[in-house]
Image (spheres, rainbow, N blue to C red):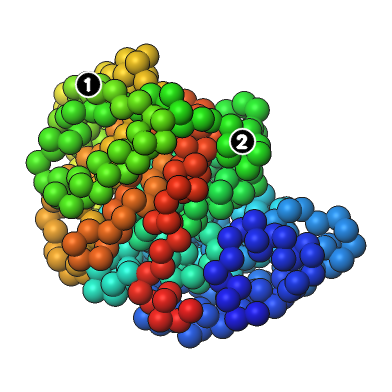
Amino acid sequence: MTNLHRLSIRELSEGLQQGKFSSRELTQHYLKRIEKIDAQVKSYVTVTPELALSQANAADAAIKAGNATALAGIPLAHKDIFCTQGVRTSAGSKMLDNFISPYDATVVTKAKAAGLVTLGKVNMDEFAMGSTSESSYYGATKNPWNLDYVPGGSSGGSAAVVAADLAPFATGTDTGGSIRQPASFCGLTGLKPTYGRISRFGIIAFASSLDQAGPMARSAEDCAYLMNVIAGHDAKDSTSVDKEVDDYVANLNATSVKGLRIGIPKQYFNVAGLAADVKARVEESLKKLEDMGAILVEVDLNMVEAYVPTYYLIAPAEASSNLSRYDGVRYGYRCENPVDLMDLYKRSRSEGFGEEVKRRILIGTYALSAGYYDAYYVKAQKVRRLIQQDFLKAFEQVDVIAAPSAPTTAYKIGANLSPTEMYLGDVYTLAVNLAGLPAINAPVGLDDHNLPVGLQLIGNYWSESQLLSIVHQYQQNTDFHTQRAAIAEENA
């Protein structure tokens, strides 16, 4: 079959279980596409053909023996922030360019246990710090819809591999929008779960109270299949919550859109910088949901102006602490011929980290320093609680809250946004991480330049099933999630 990459996860599962094709054939199909197309997209940092074919053979044997899981044999790409045993795990940084992980992240362990096939590790902004995937040590990944544009970040590689049909689905991480924004830029569905829903063990840390893994795929249904594999409590992660996991696939039709109360924060639709065509597509999608029976309710979220400054104090402070371990001593990059220990520290860190990472370390170290800890960091944590309370108050009136996922569509590569411009682009996503809430991006059309636009739905705690169900039903009544990027169409 020549169009295996056009099949949904459900169709791939059924095809494998029914013997229409083997996992080895499917895996070879994707490896050939990667070899043919990825030089243009630059989504993969490391391709693992030997590992993939070995896992595919094992999946085929399990299917033949009749003891395979539903997803056995389906290929998957991992963001290069998930530790993968025996495979380079770089976090997009020169600092970890030579790091071969000695163990698997829990997400990787669960994917292997489910019989998923690892195609490789995909590109990202360095240490997940950025919104364009241009800060990677390995160069910029390109948006499959138009190779002159970025795919978003930091999970830009994860978005690009799916949008270019170089993997059926991918793992991502979201610290301030890093699943939802690239999903929006690349026309995909991407879910940021409730903090604690998916284990962070083995995920290279950026900001520990904000980081959360999640699935990226074409549809809510495809995301639900991956959520069934990776969600759940993990004793190795002290922030993982021991709470029963839903069957996300079985629940895809459990939430009725009819009578669903969708909150529309008036402050979100008056943000400076919200592009007219983005606003129009989002409003059209809300009108469609209204036609399906949803009730649109205006709500107030009064803390919008505090989102960006609060996040960009807390996240860099945690990054400063987490990245202090990279000192040139134990593992990772080490400078040549240091004259003494202090020279080793200084040059290893200054040579091993990129500009954006250094900027955030400096901001965070400043915010945590003796004279400023109470004035900045402690105050930001207090404001964080107010942001959370603002959402909880809104959820007393509505079931979910709607917003754009980003104020614009994808930026041009090399646009050289100032740090402030880049940070303001996260205005719609940051607060979700600060509050620990779940949120999902759904593609809702194209802008005037034929680039994808995303709708974000924010849920109350542990409402991942509800969010996936709403988007699934929306996708049963629209075809935006089936539209293909230019490079995928050219190489159909």
Depth order, front residue of 71/211: 71
Up/down of 29 relative to 63, above or below: below
Q: Where is residue 330 in the image (x, y as percent from the top left)?
A: 48, 57
Q: Mark 2 points at which residue?
A: 251
Horizontal side of residue 480 vs 410, given as left or right: right
Mark 1 secondary-structure assignment? loop
**Which is more foreground, mark 2 or mark 1?**
2
Q: Residue furthest right?
A: 65
Horizontal side of residue 348 vs 85, given as left or right: left
Q: What residue type is labelled 2?
A: Asn
Horizontal side of residue 259 vs 344, given as left or right: right
Horizontal side of residue 84 vs 176, given as left or right: right
Residue at 63% over, 33% down: 246
The N terminus: image quadrant = bottom right
Up/down of 152 relative to 307, above or below: below
Q: What residue type is labelled 1?
A: Asp
Depth order, front residue of 357/247: 247
Q: Where is residue 174 in the image (x, y as percent from the top left)?
A: 40, 45
Residue at 17% over, 36% down: 269
Q: Mark 1 points at which residue?
A: 300
